[in-house]
Image (cartoon, rainbow, N blue to C red):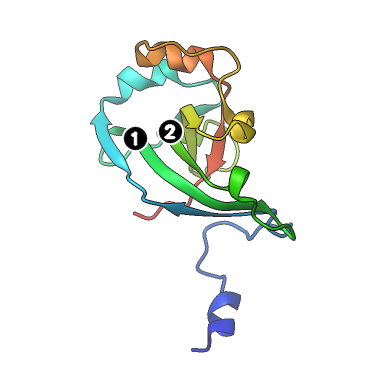
Amino acid sequence: MPLRDVLLTIDHRPWELPTRPWGITQWWRHLLFAHWPIEPEKLIPLLPEPVTLDLFEGMAWVAVVPFRMAGVRPRFAPALPWISDFIELNLRTYVLPKQGRQQPGVHFWSLEASQPFEGRYRPTKPATPSPLLHFSEALEVAIWPLQRLV
């Protein structure tokens, strides 16, 4: 099948395609997804009200994800070496909304970047080295759509 036909085949997708064109491009380099299973009862109190855990085989999963972002740029703009490449580290779990469309998402307890320009995703008040509960209290809620692979 020609590539154009592959890209136009969408009936297998569980969600509709976005109605807006993409706005940002980026590459993830040197990526690690380190996951640990955890009993859901331990994480549920740490989540914001609009979401619940997305379980796999009855367990919640906490991930630490370090990587290098490269070529981050808005659509129709060039990448700028001094702001478009940086190291990122995030602490996350996988969630579902409690109401409405059940599209899986990611809840970030911490999203740290070596590039201050990326600061819009940083904590709203300083996060101190502390148990997970304090990360959750110190950060804004961030839910990002996620395509389930399993």
Q: Are the residues flagged by discs 1 and 2 in contact, CB closer than 8 Å?
A: yes
Using the image, tell me which numbered label, if any, was put on residue 100.
none
Secondary-structure class at tag 1 = strand
- Distance (Cα) linking label 1 and label 2: 8 Å
Q: Residue at x 60, y 38 (%)?
A: 100
Circle 2 residue: 90
Is the residue marked by circle 2 packed among few (<14), some (14-19), or many (20+) residues within 10 Å? some
Residue 95's spot in the image, x, y percent?
A: 45, 35
Q: Residue at x 57, y 84 (%)?
A: 5
When asked about the image quadrant of residue 149, the answer is bottom left
Kind of residue at disc 2: Asn
Secondary-structure class at tag 2 = strand
Q: Residue at x 32, y 45 (%)?
A: 32
Residue 78's spot in the image, x, y percent?
A: 69, 58
Total numbered labels placed on residues in the image: 2
Q: Nearer the viewer, residue 62 or 125?
A: 125
When asked about the image quadrant of residue 139, the answer is top right
Q: Residue at x 50, y 40 (%)?
A: 105
Is the residue marked by circle 1 packed among few (<14), some (14-19), or many (20+) residues within 10 Å? some
Could you tell which of marks 1 and 2 lies nearer the N-terminus? 1
Circle 1 residue: 63
Kind of residue at disc 1: Ala
47 sits left or right of 144 in the view? left
Residue 134's spot in the image, x, y percent?
A: 43, 11
Q: Nearer the viewer, mark 1 or mark 2?
A: 2
